[in-house]
Image: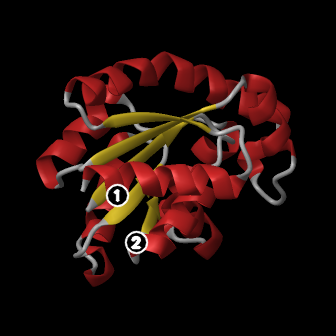
Amino acid sequence: MNILFLGQPGVGKSTYSALVGKHFKIPSVSAGELLRQEVKKGTALGKKVKPYIDKGLLVPHIITDALLIQRFKQSDCKKGFILNGILSPSERSDLLHRHIKIDYVIYFKAPKKTLLKRIAGRKGRSDSTPRVVELRYQAYKKRNSKLRGIYNKQGILTVIDARPPIDEVVERIIDVIDENR
């Protein structure tokens, strides 16, 4: 079972992904987290992508594609995974369709005010400054309505309100997946 979580920065994808992944016993995979790990390790790749991350820019898709494909091949992904992150329609949907089958797409929505408040509470992330957050928010809005349309046409998209408490949102996600399995 392969699940894709979509949503604006700060909507809670990482939190929901960890909890839902634990419930279904599948790993949570985040392109952003994979990239941040490379930066933290100080690898050549990390040094190459750090300026993009610090400025809230998209890392070139050839880099994130390679990291994701490598991660999907690991043994803990054999039963499935949750991919959480921001994907652009032309690049990432092609990656997903060429290498994996997505069974469910969950799009989390929340007002911009809620998102900015959540992001302001993050600690230790260079991509969480107000200026970078605004850039990420605007970039997201431009890219992802097309991607949601693609998955909606395929009948695998569910929109979930991310404003309720975490446990309520997680319960709703699990219910949606269980209803459609």
In the visual, does 21 lie left or right of 74?
Answer: right
Residue 58 visible? The answer is: no
Q: Relative to residue 100, is residue 16 drawn left or right?
A: right
Identify the residue at horizontal 60%, vertical 71% (top origin).
Answer: 42
- For the residues carrying marks 2 and 1, which lies nearer the camera in this image? 1
Which sits in the foreground, 174 or 20?
A: 174
**Pointer 1 residue:** 178
Nearer-N-terminus badge (2/1): 2
- Callout 2 crowding tier (Cα within 10 Å): few <14, some 14–19, many ≥20: some
Please tell me how crowded label 1 is: few (under 14), some (14-19), or many (20+) other residues with Cα within 10 Å. Answer: few
Residue at point 22% right, 23% down? 153
**x and y, in percent, of residue 177 in the image:** 36, 53
Q: Secondary structure at mark 1?
A: helix
Tell me the quarter of the picture where residue 52 sits: top right
Identify which residue, 142 or 126, lies in the foreground.
142
Q: Quadrant of residue 156?
A: top left
Q: Quadrant of the C terminus?
A: bottom left
Kindly identify which residue carries mark 2.
24
Which amino acid lies under the numbered mark 2 shown in the image of this protein? Phe
* Residue type for callout 1: Asp
